[in-house]
Amino acid sequence: MLSNRIAADPAADHPLRHLMRILLIALASACTLASSAMAQAPATGPLVLLLPASTRATGMGNTWVAGRDETSVFYNPAQINPTTGFGGRVVRYGDDALLGTLANAMTINWLTLGWGVQVVEFKASGFSSYPYDPSEVTRSGGTREAQSLEVVAGGNFLIKKFRTGIGLKYAEDRADAAINPLSSATLSYMAPAIHRGVVLGDVGVSHALLSGTAALAVQNIGDDSRVKLTIQTTLVWARQMQAQQLDLAFATQVSLRRDWLGAGGGVEAGWGWIEGWSAAVRAGAHRTETAAQKPIAMGATLNADHLS
């Protein structure tokens, strides 16, 4: 039915073709990079900084540096967008890991402010080295109780039609000591307890470009003497548009992190049939941190008033 309506309306056909062309290029680039020889990203910590803060972003290949909602405080302070209330999310990873996110944003005169908290509880393997990689939260059989926490605040304002943002955050990893299961000694450890915390800064900028939004974010700026950090620079272009009764959104992005280049892309199609009620489906691909992760992601959402 959708294809018949589009074929009858050339005006709707053009943006959809443009959308698919950009998406295919982004997905092909992401999959090519994912299968390249440099598949392993540089180890960095804390772990929570490598996990998606939004399930919507996850389904779009985690391409959310140009996204605008309360979770943007975790991706790009320039894109923080005021909301009508707190946004909370709970995500289950495998059998032993649970992630929770709480965020909020508001506008005061010319300044938009936002804050957020994100924490993941998981069981790390006693044989895993630190810093942990993202696949640690999906492994089963872990013996070390572990936690990764991020507390972030930021704000943005307009400077000559460029939205500029600055963010400050505290992030840390904690893990119990790992006891050697092959030793009968009471205090024989494979690895000591972990408590690594650091204060970091983020900066970002966004601007309208080619009927969409171009955004740049530089994240994790700080002292790496206590925690092994890698500054990440991400450039993204995203667009939202309408085709018949569908609300379409897509994004492509490239990230650079110390001799490691990542790319990703995602698309979303939404439909609202009555005020306050809507549904959306999305798909994306991106270069993963490790070979154990999958480069393809898909998702769906049902919005019922203020509940998603």
Image (spheres, rainbow, N blue to C red):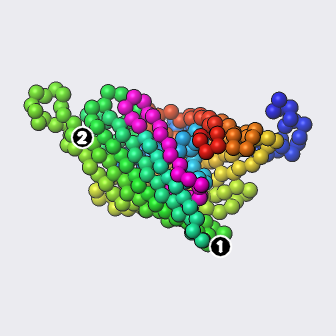
At 37% from the left and 31% from the top, the residue drawn is: 96
Element assignment for label 1: loop
Residue 306 visible to the viewer = yes
Seen as rendered, the residue at the extreme left is: 185
What range of the chain is rendered magenta? Answer: 72-98
Label of residue 176 in the image: 2
Against 65, residue 98 (above or below) is above
In the image, taking residue 10 as reference, residue 267 lies left or right, namely: left
At 52% from the left and 55% from the top, the residue drawn is: 104
**Residue 222, quarter of the rendered image:** bottom left
As for residue 60 lying within the magenta part, the answer is no
Where residue 293 sits: x, y (%)? 47, 34
In the image, taking residue 158 as reference, residue 244 lies left or right, namely: right
Against 8, residue 148 (above or below) is below
Where residue 210 sits: x, y (%)? 73, 57
At 56% from the left and 44% from the top, the residue drawn is: 57
Against 266, residue 96 (above or below) is above
Residue 230 visible to the viewer = no
Identify the residue position indicated by label 1 in the image. Answer: 160
At label 1, the amino acid type is: Lys
Element assignment for label 2: loop
At 53% from the left and 45% from the top, the residue drawn is: 54
Where residue 66 sits: x, y (%)? 60, 54
**Residue 189, quarter of the rendered image:** top left
